[in-house]
Image: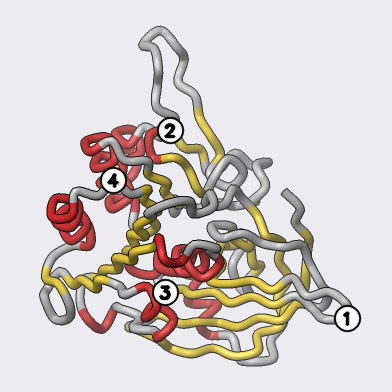
Amino acid sequence: MAWTRFRARLMGRETVAASQHVAQFRCDSSGPAAQPGQFVQLNLPGVYWPRPFSLLDWSPGGAGEAASFRLLFAEAGRGTRALAALEPGCALEGHGPLGRPFPEVHGPTWMVAGGYGVAPLLFASRSSQSPAHIRFFYGAARAQALWRTSQLDSFSPTLCTEDGSHGVKGTVLDAVRSELRRTGERPMVFACGPMALLSAVAALGKEMQLKAYVSVETPMPCGIGVCRGCAMALAETHASEARRYAMACEDGPVFEAGELDWEMEAACRV
């Protein structure tokens, strides 16, 4: 897919939940179109490797208009703290949009978001030509970590907190499983969030024979498949085959859930 190197200026930043921010950037020129699930790589001050950020939205510009994009991110490490410390007007270099996006929505589709994984799923929902087919499930550990944005309202979201401080008490996957049993529906599932959530979505999809797509979170030093630093083990089809790997940045970050070896992924996180 087409991508470009760009220079982008931070136009503004808003704190929207506990340690979570929405940052608005404007590029120095127009750029290619982006699809939900794709990401950009940003070169941040004091950080050696570029950092990947899922797109909340993207406007390619054109006809004299520069490209612009928004990111939802949480302060979790050196890269995200560096981004949170930037003052409006600061310029960064980066490249994108990158990676394999979510497929188009056709028929009933349930969005399953954990934490700031809500960003690409909101992008996918707002870009859909069939918004009536979408249901949104969004969870976090506590109420302060939920981004309660009006942009979600049109999708009648089911909000969940593990401590019961807002919405349904329990994990977002608990709510999804409960609704599947109650309604008897067999939707397609899109998911983004912590890897443990994605693994659980993959297991649920296999158990209930649902088509599920997950957007993985893993370090991606180059973003274009050159450094081989974001390898994900693929599920083996035959015991005699050598293990195969995909690059999250180039072959993903969106995968059909059954493509990946979730036991191997969990072992690598220990």
Q: Residue 137's x, y, as percent? A: 29, 65
Crowd rating for badge 4 (residues with CA inside 10 Å; few <14, some 14–19, many 20+): some
Residue 65 in view, yes or no: yes
- The dot on residue 186 is 4
Q: Earlier in the sequence, mark 2 or mark 3?
A: 3
Which residue is under mark 2?
259
Separation of marks 1 and 2 at Cα, in angstroms: 42 Å
Q: Residue 171's x, y, as percent? A: 18, 62
Label 3 amino acid? Ala
Q: Nearer the viewer, mark 3 or mark 1?
A: 1
Which residue is under mark 3?
74
Separation of marks 4 and 1 at Cα, in angstroms: 45 Å
Judge left or right: residue 53 versus residue 145.
Answer: right
Q: Which element carries disc 1, helix, strand or loop?
A: loop
Which of 53/179 is in front?
A: 179
Q: Nearer the viewer, mark 4 or mark 1?
A: 4
Q: Earlier in the sequence, mark 2 or mark 4?
A: 4
Q: Are marks 1 and 2 in contact (CB under 8 Å)?
A: no
Separation of marks 2 and 3 at Cα, in angstroms: 28 Å
Separation of marks 2 and 4 at Cα, in angstroms: 20 Å
